[in-house]
Image: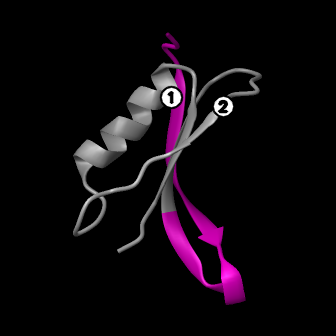
Amino acid sequence: MYDGIMAETIRITGAGGDEIGAYFARPLGPGPYPGVVVIHHMPGWDEATKEIARRFATHGYSAICPNLF
């Protein structure tokens, strides 16, 4: 388990140049790390969903949660 992680809100450019926000969490260190996509429930992001991404990061995964709402 990793103690140090980095977690932040980023912007992703999609098809047609549209941008959406995404919450990205990963372990600190050189990597590489396997990746996980976390899908939120309706109506969108909340603290619990972001905590899921952070938990994956503490277990050695890069986790991204795009804001799909």
Mark 1 is surrounded, within 10 Å at the Cα level, by few (under 14), some (14 to 19) or many (20 or more) other residues, namely many
Circle 1 sits on which residue?
57
The stretch in magenta equals 1-21
Mark 2 is surrounded, within 10 Å at the Cα level, by few (under 14), some (14 to 19) or many (20 or more) other residues, namely few
Q: Residue 36, percent across and down?
A: 54, 41
Q: Residue 48, percent across and down?
A: 24, 43
Q: Is residue 68 above or below residue 40?
A: below
Q: Residue 63, percent across and down?
A: 53, 40
Kind of element beneath mark 1: helix
Say what amino acid the circle numbered 1 marks. Answer: Ala
Q: Quadrant of residue 15?
A: bottom right
Circle 2 sits on which residue?
34
Q: Which residue is pictured at 32% across the width and 37% down the height?
A: 51
Label disc, if present, on residue 10 of the rendered structure: none
Say what amino acid the circle numbered 2 marks. Answer: Pro
Q: Are marks 1 and 2 in contact (CB under 8 Å)?
A: no
Q: Alpha-carbon distance for marks 1 and 2?
A: 10 Å
Q: Is residue 15 above or below residue 46?
A: below
